[in-house]
Image: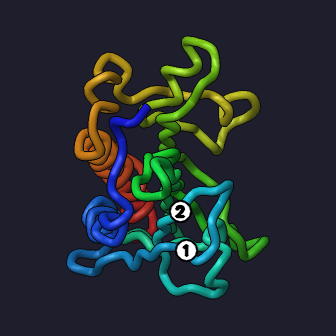
C-alpha cells in the first residue's frame, strides 16, 4: 500500500503535524516535543513524542505528560523507506495512554490506539488492524490483545491518504482525551 506515503524531505514537517495531533492531551498551549530518532527500527525511520529524553536512541521509553495528574502518554510512528529511500510509507502509528504505577515507579498501559496500515494477516483481523483500532490494556486476557476498529466502515477512505489517516488519528486522540484522560483529572481534583 503506497497511499500513505511522503517524500523523505517531508519527514521533518511531520513533526509539527504530530505536535498538533497530540495537543488535546496536553495543558493548553504547551506543545509536545517530537523528534526523529537516530536509530532505525526494523529498517523504519521513527518519529516519537517525549517529555524530555533520557536515552536519545530508545524511543520505546519516551513518554510525555498529559493534563491529568499521573496520566502520561506515548506516541510514535514508523515510516518505511522505499523507492531508493526517496519516499517513506507509514508502517505504524501507536498511541498509548499510561498511568503512573506508584508501587513500581513505572507506567502501566490503560488504553491504546494503534494503526498498522501494512498489516498482511488474514481477514477480518487484517482490516481490524490496518486502520486506527483500540486496545483495552487494563483488562484480563485475552481482552488486551483484541483489536476494536474505530473506522472500519470508512477504512478505504482512512487509508487513502496521509491526511485522512491523520484526521482519523486526531479523532481518536480527542476521544481518548475526553473519555479517558479527563476522567482521571476529575478523579484527582
Within 10 Å of the Cα at label 2, are there few (<14), some (14-19), or many (20+) other Cα atoms? many
Query: Residue at the spot x=49%, y=20% of the render?
Result: 127
Q: Residue furthest front?
A: 84
Camera-nearest residue between 168 and 25: 168
**Secondary structure found at label 1:** loop
Q: In whole angstroms, how far apart are the C-alphas of marks 1 and 2?
A: 7 Å
Disc 1 to disc 2: CB gap under 8 Å? yes
* Left or right of residue 20, residue 78 in this image: right
Quadrant of the rendered image containing residue 168: top left
Pick whichever, 105 or 1, lies toward us: 1
Task: Name above or below for residue 134 compared with residue 181.
Answer: above
9 or 98, which lies in front?
Answer: 9
Judging from the image, what secondary structure is the residue with disc 2 in? strand
75 vs 58: above or below: above
Image side of residue 90 versus residue 168, left or right:
right
User: What x and y, as percent, mark residue 24?
Assistant: 28, 61
Q: With respect to residue 128, does 15 lie above or below?
A: below
In the image, farthest residue toward the top: 123
Q: Residue at x 34, y 70 (%)?
A: 15
Residue 67: x and y in percent read 36, 71
User: Where is the C terminus found, in terms of image quarters?
Assistant: bottom left
User: What is the number of the mark on residue 45?
Assistant: 2
Which labelled disc corresponds to residue 120? none
**Whole-percent x and y of residue 9?**
33, 67
Task: Tell me where residue 17 appears, x and y as whole percent.
Answer: 27, 63
Question: So how many labels did they put on this image?
Answer: 2
Q: Is residue 93 visible?
A: no
Does the rendering let one see residue 176? yes
Task: Tell me if mark 1 has few (under 14), some (14-19) or many (20+) residues whose alpha carbon lies within 10 angstroms of its own.
Answer: some
- Residue under circle 1? 37
Amino acid at each position: 500500500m503506497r497511499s500513505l506515503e511522503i517524500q523523505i524531505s517531508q519527514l521533518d514537517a511531520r513533526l509539527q503535524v504530530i505536535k498538533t495531533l497530540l495537543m488535546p492531551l496536553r495543558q493548553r498551549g504547551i506543545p509536545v516535543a517530537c523528534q526523529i530518532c537516530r536509530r532505525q527500527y526494523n529498517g523504519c525511520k521513527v518519529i516519537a513524542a517525549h517529555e524530555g529524553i533520557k536515552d536519545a536512541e530508545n524511543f520505546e521509553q519516551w513518554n510525555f505528560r498529559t493534563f491529568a495528574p499521573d496520566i502520561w502518554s506515548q506516541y510514535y510512528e514508523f515510516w518505511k523507506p522505499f523507492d531508493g529511500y526517496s519516499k517513506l510509507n507509514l508502517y505504524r502509528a501507536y498511541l498509548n495512554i499510561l498511568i503512573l504505577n506508584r508501587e513500581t515507579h513505572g507506567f502501566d498501559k490503560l488504553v491504546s490506539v494503534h494503526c498498522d496500515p501494512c498489516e498482511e494477516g488474514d481477514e477480518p483481523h487484517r482490516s481490524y488492524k490496518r486502520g486506527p483500532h483500540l486496545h483495552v490494556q487494563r483488562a484480563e486476557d485475552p481482552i488486551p490483545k483484541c483489536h476494536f476498529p474505530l473506522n472500519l466502515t470508512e477504512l478505504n477512505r482512512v487509508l487513502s491518504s496521509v491526511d485522512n489517516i491523520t484526521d482519523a488519528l486526531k479523532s481518536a486522540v480527542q476521544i481518548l482525551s475526553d473519555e479517558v484522560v479527563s476522567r482521571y483529572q476529575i478523579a484527582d481534583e
